[in-house]
Image (cartoon, rainbow, N blue to C red):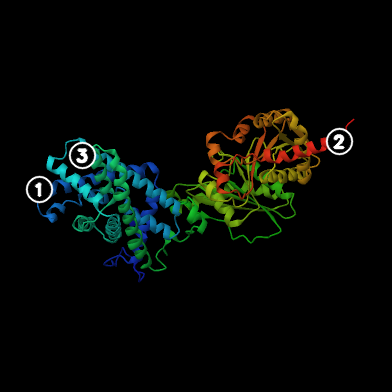
Amino acid sequence: MSDDDDSAAEIPQRAESGAPAYGTVMPDRFSSDEVFQRVVADADHEITSGTRELFFSALAGGFAITLTFLIYASMSTKTDSEVVAALLYPLGFIYIIIGGYQLYTENTLPPVALVLERLSSVPTLLRHWVIVLAGNFAGGALGAVALAYGGVFDAPSAEMAVSLAEKGIETPATSLFFKGAFAGLVVAGVVWINFAVRDTASRLLVVYLAFLMIPLGNLFHVVVSFTEVVYLTLVLGDVWILFPAMTQFVIPVLLGNTLGGVLLVTVVNYYQTSERRLDIDRYENTRRLTIREWLLGSLSGRTYVPVVDTVETIVRDEDSYRILVPIANPRTEARLVEFACALAETKEKGQVHVVHIVQAPQHVADSSGHHDRILRESDRLLEDIRRIGDGYDVEFGTSTIVSPRSFEEIFDRARRTRPDLVLMGWGQDQLWTSARAESHLDELTNRLPTDFLVVKDRGLDPSRVLLPTAGGPDSDLSAEIAQALEKGADAEITLLHVVDDPADRAAGEAFLSDWASDHGLEGAEIVIDDSGDVEQAICRTARDLNATVVMMGATERGLLSRLVRDSLHIDVARVVEGSVLLSERPSQRTFTERLFGSGSREDRRLEEYRDREKNAEAAEPRT
């Protein structure tokens, strides 16, 4: 739980009768729905926090746990009463919860509530847990180092600290798991009650009494256990005990804490709320994640939900060809819209929909006053864009999205409206530096919703088009675009194929001729380059032809391969003088291909033509 209590309190709270929670009528306590609303509001703030702030907040929390270990070991040597020894045990937890630091066992409630509501994905929850747990362990380890080498303990206390750790290690794993489960229940229960109480004094009392149960009930908390293990390892100077201590002590406690918090509290508390638990203004227009997004996506909190979306319900005409054009700046992206209209006009029922995506910080986007101002300005800027549409024989429309996200909205809109093509600019925000439409994580877990064409605009003159290809679905999309430009703009099309050896020129020419015929580009000029250097061949041919547009399919090299070497697409885009179009079509590549793929389709494809040339030569009569 963070210190964002004020933002949680700002949620319009209403009793089940409909009476306002704040005002002339004050209910004695929050209903379950109202507590859940406060939990979700706070969880949204936490799970969307940056890695740095999350980790260091958890680091502070882990170090604060050192106080619990310190005072418990010290008090145990000063009294024979276990009750008296445990009286100050909750001190470290009080610092954490009242101070708003991150503690792993607290995070088994708020973020899980978001996941249960499908407002956040499972991978995002796991990322959050890993960061917080790593921060807690790092803080606990630093505290253990200070206790082991700082002379903080006297001799009896140091001996007691060692015995506490040894006691945990000697406890059977099954007992540790169930003791940890009850401790997890205690901590997550404290979090729930904290959102139900109204004042700090009540919160302090709840925290103190609840965490007093851990030593008195002989329960175990994972961060305290980890601190004890690190301390024992340092004092004994035996690093080899660390592994068995982690597997036989810390990990069973971790699993128990997690299950206790998630299953025994979060799920139970979730299902005691009504179906209208989030039926309030703050979540009125919230879209739940799809099952695929929920299980595999990287979306989190309400930051993926557009605050304003002016698009009207689209009734899809299956015979139409729809192009979605997301833009960030209508003043500078007019040529992109013209290009989309020119492509759509070559279709029998061409449609173009331009969506102006306005990125605004959450606190600005949440203000209704800012909504009206942003929408008025967007509508004014889109007037010139609408005039462009009037000049083409296409069905044309515009809309505006205001959201804390920017380009992520493109993929969501494409999934919802199902266009045939998304045409967008290659901007300065480096979204496309991986030479693919998806982010790295989305590339491994998701499939593109439709065809994408990303444009590096340097005039967008379609008169001379260079299309390098080695085959594949992305090149198929490039061929379709080239056909449209040939038909609608009388473009001159040149096809390029690069082979590794002069001996492969004939095979390469045969391949490229067949490919051109299969894709309706029989009139295109064919160029074979035998240098084997694809990047240099594209740049050299573009320069020789004075190409105004270079069209390339997205790379099929796997993610790991691209992390080691830059993609040639980016290098080409930097060098050529004309516009660059990057096309990508949804593919069925396996997870292994997405991760390790070499993108060497041209090698496999060309081998067929090599064999054909050899057979033709063998069949020729000898003189």
x%, y% of residue 242? 29, 42
Amino acid under disc 2: Glu
Q: Earlier in the sequence, mark 1 or mark 3?
A: 1
For badge 3, the amino acid type reads: Leu
How many marks do you count on the picture?
A: 3
Residue assigned mark 1: 78
Residue at 27% across / 39% down in the picture? Answer: 142
First of labels 3, 2 by sequence position: 3
Q: CA distance from mark 2 to mark 1?
A: 102 Å
Residue in front for this viewpoint, 481 or 609: 609
Q: Quadrant of the C terminus?
A: top right
Label 3 environment density (alpha carbons within 10 Å; few <14, some 14–19, many ≥20): many
Residue 330 shown left or right of residue 59 in the figure: right
Quickly name the residue at label 2. 620
N-terminal-most mark, 2 or 1:
1
In the displayed image of the protein, which residue is found farthest to the bottom?
A: 17
Indicate the amino acid at tag 1: Lys
Q: Residue furthest right?
A: 623
Disc 1 to disc 3, C-alpha distance:
18 Å
Check disc 2 and report its element: helix, strand or loop: loop
In-front residue for pair 53/403: 53
Residue wearing tag 3? 147
